[in-house]
Image (cartoon, rainbow, N blue to C red):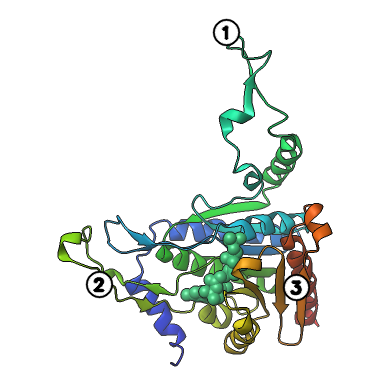
Amino acid sequence: MAEPRISSIDGKLAEEFAVPSHVEEVKEKMAAFASFHAEAGRKVVLITSGGTKVPLESRTVRFLDNFSSGRRGASSAEYFIDSGYAVIFLHRHRSLYPYTRMFLTINMLDALEFQGGGAPGNTGEVVVNQQVLPNIAKVLKRYEEVKESRLLLPIEFNTLSEYLHLLKAAAQALSTIGSKAMFYLAAAVSDFYIPASEMPEHKIQSSNGPLQLSMKMVPKILSPLVKDWAPQAFVISFKLETDASILLDKARRALDTYRHQAVVANVLDSRRGYVVVVTPETQAELILTEEDVKNEVEIEERIVSNLTLAHDNFITQQVA
Ligand code: PMT
């Protein structure tokens, strides 16, 4: 089927996906963040992270979701900051978050204790248990530095509609800094949705029998992003498959269709240790060895290192 025209995607977004009330305010914040950092000589990356929620009722009781934990986006944010970027982190509410992601599996109360032990009557100062959180001081220090230098701007989304409108706003906000902007689209975005006009208002009743859903195709936002909203930016999409045999072909097809700069291709089960970065001219396999895993190396460090280099080359070519 032919790709919808750009203007029709804009129209569809406005008509069929509820516009979040704070979108203009967030857009201004992102534009101010981008120009502040670009003037300071920094590049800015917009990372999308986590899965989108697709409601089945407008007073939502039920929704479709997906597997994405947000780890790829959250860890990449840290490596981009370490590489000198300022990061807009457009993430699903309560998905993994830079720095705190390392402590997510820990029960907060197990990590705290009373100074001087838990003897009856000791309600003194509460301190961190260093056995439960051995690295907390190091991570806290880095987190404070990042906060102090305002290198991380977190923006939350929940639903598919919020994601689409906020991504459009981000693209328009970052268009002012041209090729210094990178888009790193790691979120797992639903391909299907129910338009607002066709959504039942109230909870779907099981007394009406088995549920049959008819969902529409979500417009591919990559198309207007690359052609229209941020045409000078360096754009990376991700391609996820469960069948490894079709992965690279799909990644190449995405590059042919959208004409952006790179696709990071990954398979669901091996995504933590193996990805392929595909560009129109190259194909780089990034693999973690057993030794890497033992040393707690993360694949995102390699992905970010590959892409920041490619971004620098891209900027140089634009200037030349
Ligand atoms: O979060 P983790 O658990 O760490 O997992 C990371 C990940 C597997 C989610 C990540 O590495 C990944 O592959 N993300 C993209 C998954 C995906 O949704 O692929 P897709 O084939 O549906 O979409 C391909 C690209 O098109 C994506 O970059 C997406 O941002 C973009 N897209 C998708 C839908 C849509 N309507 N418009 C889009 O532009």
- Where ligand 1 lies, by image quadrant? bottom right
Q: Nearer the viewer, residue 154 or 210?
A: 210
Q: Which residue is mark 1?
A: 120
Relative vertical location of residue 75 with respect to residue 3 in this rendering, above or below:
above
Q: Position of residue 311 (x, y in %)?
A: 75, 73
Furthest-left residue in view?
A: 207
Going from the N terminus, do you reach mark 2 or mark 1 first? 1
In the figure, is residue 157 to the left or right of 233?
Answer: left
Q: State how far apart marks 3 and 2 are (Cα).
A: 42 Å
Closest to the camera, between mark 3 and mark 2, is: 2
Q: Three-letter amino acid code at disc 2?
A: Glu
Name the residue type under label 3. Answer: His
User: Mark 2 = which residue?
Assistant: 198
Q: Give the x, y percent position of residue 28.
A: 52, 59
Q: Earlier in the sequence, mark 1 or mark 3?
A: 1
Residue 301 screen position, x and y as percent: 76, 60
- In this view, 311 is above or below 67: below
The circle drawn on residue 311 is: 3
Check disc 1 and give the amino acid type: Pro
Q: Residue at x 77, y 84 (%)?
A: 282
Whole-Å distance between the Cαs marked 2 and 1? 61 Å
Toward the right, the furthest residue is 291
Q: Quadrant of residue 34?
A: bottom right
Q: Residues within 10 Å of mark 3 (few under 14, many from 20)?
A: many
Nearest to the observer: residue 286 or residue 189: 286
